[in-house]
Amino acid sequence: MTALISAVGLAGALILLIWMTVRGVNILLAGPIAAALVAMTSGIAWLPPLAGEGAPDFATSYMNGFTGFFADWFLMFLLGAIFGEVMGASGAAASVAHWVIGKIGIRHAVLAVVAACAILTYGGVSVFIVGFAVYPLAVHLFREADMPRRFIPGALCFGSVTFTMTSAGSPEIQNLIPMQYLGTDAYAGWEVSLIVALLMAGLGYYLLDGMVKRAVARGERFESRPGDDVSAVDRHLPHPLLCLLPLVAVLGVFMLFQYPQAVPVVSAILPAQSLGKWALVMALGVGMAFAVLIGLRSRGAMPAAFSRGATGAVVAITNTCAVVGFGAVASLSPAFHAALDAVQNLPGDPLIGAAIAVTVIAGLTGSASGGQTIALPLLAPNYLAMGADPAELHRTVAIASGALDSLPHNGYVVTTIRAICGETHHDAYPAVGVLTVLVPLVGLAVAIGLFAIV
């Protein structure tokens, strides 16, 4: 009976969390409220004095999950957000996006938006910042092409959090978290990752382009709003090739400190082993310096950009921490442990079990990074002991985390649809869901299949 109540409570808490976020409740409130429901239905004490000796309690468990993720990843969020803001203030992000648009053309406006997001994301700009940077240009493109603007969130999300975010070599944290648990590097399983990324990019674009064309055929058109023209579309921008330098610097330095032993000068200064996730700190710092130099013409805007970046980093990471805290409490429930045991004891390939576990946990928490942070400490030792290849496990976990995490309560989805684009879930989420849930699930299945035959 206790297990049944716990299962009902866990499912109800997830439904409540999704409902509250769709209704616009701040995730910093929705997260602990939903976690409290899990605690209440799982027999977890509310406060430390009410818990038995050695027993967990809601307040401590929630805050341990919240602050643990904050401590592990705040520097990366901070530097990533500031880097993105500096790229925006200098005009570099807009210049790169304009360059992509100019090469692809207005006839392929959807592809141009997706490509601009992909280049910025793989260049190290935080996914939260990419949306803000590309949105004004997306509005310009969709207006020129007379396409319904409700698909802008889908284009932004698809270009940011699918085939780029979880691919080998990506400096996004969703590709870095498995490193500390599996002893891998950011390029783990790159051969399969390349195939899967190309598949997801092609399939997603085909689906998005088809959705837009069908909507236009039904008579949907672009609808202007006040403030659409208040953008940086016509400002003086640095040369796009020059603006690619910060992105190249981030990727180059990131790779350099991932493989310091490959460069004698670096290996003579630093330990021979990879710096792991800390390589991103070095890379973003160097990239930020390049972006500041490129933006000297806009140096008066830099202090405000640094301030916005710092504030944005706190907002972005605390939103993620809120769902990590929910996941930390959920992981204490009997229903969670029963599901985890069932997954760990699945017969067959450990990659399948890992994929299912991370997908489900990321869906429960509404966060790819949160799902990995909760799942990997519990699952990695067991699957490695079963003989799973660390590189294959890394890539499987990374791709799996980017599927069900994009349910309606995901912090990035809420931010992109509502705060950036001013749309509603009713209008925008169907496209977002297809592109950021179904497409990565297809990619995950293909990745597991390829690992099984290579």
Image: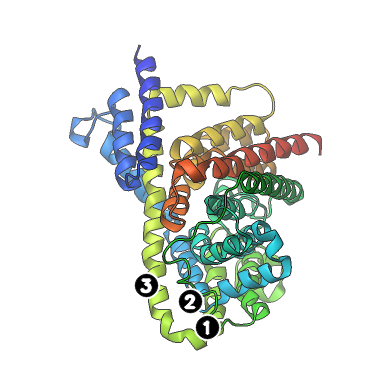
Identify the amino acid type marked 3. Ser
**The furthest residue to the right:** 454
- If the image is split into quadrants, where does the C terminus sit? top right
Question: Where is residue 318 shown, x and y percent of the image?
Answer: 37, 53
Left or right? Give the position of 314 relative to 287: left
Q: Tag 2 or tag 1, which sits nearer the N-term?
A: 2
Asked if the residues shown at circle 2 and circle 3 are in contact, with their CB atoms under 8 angstroms apart, the answer is: no
**Label 1 vs label 3: CA separation?**
16 Å
Q: Which label lies toward us, 2 or 3?
A: 2
Quadrant the N terminus occupies:
top left
Label 2 SS: helix
- Are there few (<14), some (14-19), or many (20+) residues within 10 Å of tag 2? many
Look at label 2 and name its amino acid. Ala
**Which label sits on residue 307?**
3
Residue type highlighted by circle 1: Gly
Give the quarter of the image for residue 350: top right
Q: Nearer the viewer, residue 118 or 169?
A: 118
Q: Earlier in the sequence, mark 2 or mark 3?
A: 2
- Residue receiving disc 1: 295
What residue is disc 2 on?
A: 89
Q: Residues within 10 Å of mark 3 (few under 14, many from 20)?
A: some
Q: Nearer the viewer, residue 103 or 381?
A: 103
Q: Residue furthest front?
A: 219
Q: Residue furthest left?
A: 49
Question: Where does the image place residue 77, in percent across and percent down from the top left?
Answer: 46, 61
Residue positioned 45% across, 50% down in the render: 423
Quarter of the view holding residue 304: bottom left
Left or right? Give the position of 431 relative to 191: left
Across and down, in percent, residue 291 comes to 55, 78
